[in-house]
Image (cartoon, helix red, strand yellow):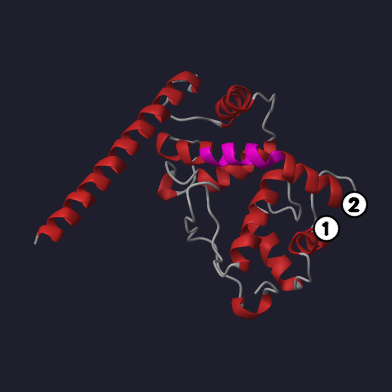
Amino acid sequence: ARGQVILVEAELQRKAAENQMKRQQNELAQSILEKYDADHNGILSPTELKKMLADYSKHRFNEEVQPTEEDLVFLFRLFDKRGGKDGKRDGNIDRSELMSLLRAWGDFMKQKEVVQGLVKTFDKDENNAIDMDELQDLLEATHKGPVKREVTEWVMRESDLSGNGLLNDLELARALLAFELLCKGEPHIRKDLSEGVVVDKDLEPPKKKTTICAVQ
């Protein structure tokens, strides 16, 4: 009985800590909204979000970074989940979506130099993006062995959120993570790249996942 009481107390403490963290995150998100929500409608438009991310990059990483239109498309397609009619995207970021988006951007900033270095190395046609053939070479180089074409095609399909057949820096970061998790037997993508593995329910696992990945 004493052991059960201890377990219950531990669970209550854990839930209290989680609730406290959520409150702090909500307060931080609200303060960000109040600063960058220029039209005071309670949400961030692409223009407002772009300014917020530029300021965050400067203050947190001491880098002058201006998010591109492709960056914004990527972020909105991942995190703009609520607010529109019939539950569809509304083209804005609200408070509930903001912190996950900010964590994703922060994690990208941490690995930006690595990603950009890979683009510089494998971007044979020098268009500042990675196409299917270049992704094939890149995955085989990072894996240090052969990668089946269907794996590369799956990685491209699940990472090319703009749908143009090319991976920009943010999409390449997502591609590398998708490949890593797939080869570990976890065909899911972390949405924020930092808070452990969060299953993206919209991501379909590849067919015959036990045989198509060369990594054992």
Amino acid beneath label 2: Lys
Q: CA distance from mark 1 to mark 2?
A: 7 Å
Q: Residues within 10 Å of mark 1 (few under 14, many from 20)?
A: many
Q: Quadrant of residue 82?
A: top left
**Closer to us: 216 or 55:** 216
The span picked out in magenta is 103-112
| Label 1 with label 2: CB-CB less than 8 Å | yes
Q: Nearer the viewer, residue 45 or 216?
A: 216
> On the picture, is 209 further left or further right than 153?
left
The label number, if any, that marks residue 124 in the structure image: 2
Name the quarter where the N terminus is drawn: bottom left
Dot 2: element: loop
Q: Is residue 91 visible?
A: no
Residue at 58% across, 36% down: 106
Q: Main secondary structure of the magenta part?
A: helix
Q: Position of residue 56 (x, y in %)?
A: 57, 26
Q: x, y (%) of residue 104?
A: 55, 42
Q: Residue furthest right?
A: 125
Q: Give whichever of discs 1 and 2 has the lower sequence position.
A: 2
Residue at 58%, 32% in the rendered image: 46
- Residue 19 in the figure: left or right of residue 125: left
Q: Position of residue 154 (x, y in %)?
A: 67, 66
Residue that badge 1 annotates: 134
Which element type, helix, strand or loop, lies under badge 1?
Answer: helix
Q: Is residue 34 above or below residue 6?
A: above
Q: Amino acid at mark 1?
A: Glu
Residue 126 on the magenta span: no
Q: Residues within 10 Å of mark 2 (few under 14, many from 20)?
A: some
